Amino acid sequence: MGFRFRKSINLGGGFRVNLSKSGVGYSWGTKGVRFTKTAKGKRRTTLSIPGTGISYVTESNGTKITAPRQPKNTTNIPALTPDNNENGGNGMVWIRFIICLLFGIFGVHKFMEKKIGMGILYLFTAGLFGLGWFYDCIKYFCIAIKNTKRSEKVSVPESESYGYPVTEYPPVEIPVKRGFSIKKLLLWIIVVFLGLMALAFLPHISSILALAAAVLLLPVEKWQGILSRFVKGKSKAIIATVVAVAAFFATPTADTPEVDRSNPNSAVVETGEVIELATLPPTEVTTEPPAELEGISFLEESYIVGVGRTVDIPFVLQPENAVSNDLEAFVDNAESAFLTFDKNGERIIQVTGVIPGEATITLCAGNAIIATKTITVAEVMPEGITINAEPQVPQVGSTGMLTAVFDPLDVTNQIVAWQSDTPEVLIINEDGSYEALSIGEATITATHENGVVGTLLMKVLPVEAERVQLNSDWEEGNSFTKGKTMTLTANVYPENTTDKSITWTSSDESVATVSDKGVVKAVAHGSVVITAMTSNGKTSTYEIRVDPTPQKFKVSYSIKMQSNDHVGSNWTKGCEYNGEEISSGTVLSIMPGETFTIFGWAEENDSRPDYGSYGGQMTLTNEMCEEGFTVEGEADVRENGGRYSGHYAVWYVKITFKPVN
């Protein structure tokens, strides 16, 4: 007997620290894989298949192993094996290629090469996003093909003498075996298949991390030895295949929870959760003989049933283990209520109210009355009222219907009293029908006999105009000329439009004007558009042409000399209209739009008369017809001979046209 101390601390993530009298050790792993270093320096690796009882344990001492000292008189001769060539031998290159192909995406081959940094980088970047993994696969494959096709001759090199004589040996040639046999090729196919299957069905990321840790902790020689032994024989490959398939089916999935088979009280329920039955108390089975029915009690003192509603009335047998197969239930007032009772079912009586009143329920066993209970059937009263209107927004002159919706919906008496607070806007009848009379708002009230009130605010909108049609009282074919009038009539549709007021406008009041009653008066020759617009913006137009009529003008003129530079002293003056001479005070009739010629003149009376005039061609406009017009300017008369040839006399001409109505 001696003092012992051992303490295991779980740090999470599968990592534990073990404290003992010998020192400190640690272990890490997950279900199926665990790596341990003891306080004495020993390394232990445990690989198992959960749920099968199959496991593999390797253990190595932590002490350093040194190579034995070589005798001085011996010669160092390298191992004469086909694998002693570049890159660790032909078999090792193929093993590294397969590991890179299957697990290179996680950086396993980098961990085997002791490139820890690159391995971690591959692990967290998925093989440098697949590019590094793809490159390494190509590289290992090319090296493996090159070593397979190459045949080398391995010779014994000369040994170092270490100061002693060395015996000379002739060179020894060992042929390197080319390629693989068909048997080994099939075995490699099995290895690749098993690796792909294991990669596809790894259930948790922790298994991947455990595999990476296994590659990191186990030396390269271990993996080489394991895989080399695996491909050496067909029988071992078959055993490995069986073990891999068993591991696949024994691995727990996300849908099937794991059961602790060491605990007999563990079980799996339908929800997939594991429960422990060891904590459940043992069930005692007791049997009691049935007792004679002594009475029946109800859970409540009184029951109220609404008309049209059904309630459950439970009852209790006394004693509870009494036999109740012959129970019957009756109601004395079938007009107020009826009941449903299943004597072989639950101990509940279902009662439905028909009309307000009271009814008595009787329970009998055989011919004996066991219990009675009086129930009250009452009307269902409303707790709230909501008013629905159709249409919801009425227009002036429209009719509709109001409906009261009760809460609850099965209120017995659903009659309400209707009222409108503004009957001049909306009037409502006893049955809920209404008529909108004018524009405005009205609050509608629905009152139940128990005092519950529902209200609704309704707005009555005007009937808007949809179109306007214009008609004229002017007879077609008659000329509409200056000074004449016509009346336009605007018909607004629909006919029940609330506001039929019209606003009249003229596009050119210099041609025709229009009054607010639609009376159009011709002012002058031309075309004009009369527009009628309703209060909501609907418009209609009417085009009118004012025909031309002759305009009378009284013409007067004056021709006065302003200067005379030795042109002459005997003169004749006058005025011409369209080539005909007119006198002052002449009345002319000119059509609007007509073109005419007007000018005044002065002439010297001698053998060689000198002549000058002012005027020209003009067109009569409506403005000229309304206001009249004047033609005025200077007429220059030039001397055409004699000693004063080229001298001028200036006359001022003024011709006035005054309208005559």
Image: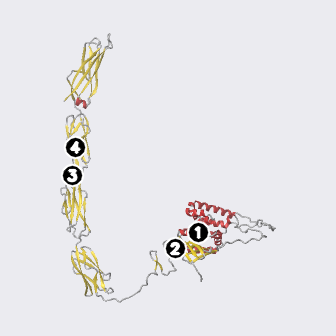
Residue marked by disc 2:
252
Three-letter amino acid code of the residue under disc 1: Ala
Observer-side mark, 1 or 2, equals 1
Look at the numbered disc 4 and give the secondary structure of its residue: strand
Q: CA–CA distance between discs 4 and 1? A: 102 Å
Return the disc, 3 or 1, that comes first in the chain's sequence: 1
* Secondary structure of residue under mark 1: helix
In the image, residue 125 sits, relative to residue 18, either above or below, namely above
- What label does residue 496 carry, if any? 3
Rounded to the nearest whole Å, what is the CA distance between mark 4 and mark 2?
Answer: 94 Å
The amino acid type, in three-letter code, at marker 2 is Pro
Find disc 1 in the rendering and name its residue: 213
Q: Which residue is mark 4?
A: 471
Q: Residues within 10 Å of mark 1 (few under 14, many from 20)?
A: some
Q: Quadrant of residue 365?
A: bottom left
Could one spot residue 201 in this view of the protein?
A: no
Secondary structure at numbered mark 3: loop
The residues tagged by marks 3 and 1 sit, at their Cα atoms, a distance apart of: 92 Å
Decide which of 641, 351 is in the foreground and name it.
Answer: 351
Q: Which one is nearer the viewer's eye here, 255 or 550?
A: 255
Up the image or down, 499 lies above or below 72; here it is above
Q: Residues within 10 Å of mark 4 (few under 14, many from 20)?
A: few
Give the mark nearest the N terminus, 3 or 4: 4
Describe residue 86's horizontal placement relative to residue 357 as left or right.
right
Amino acid type indicated by mark 3: Asn
- Spot occupied by residue 407 in the image (x, y as percentages of width and height): 26, 67
Distance from disc 3 to disc 2, alpha carbons, whole Å, reads 82 Å
Q: Which of pointers 1 and 2 lies earlier in the amino acid sequence?
A: 1
Q: Position of residue 434 (x, y in %)?
A: 20, 59
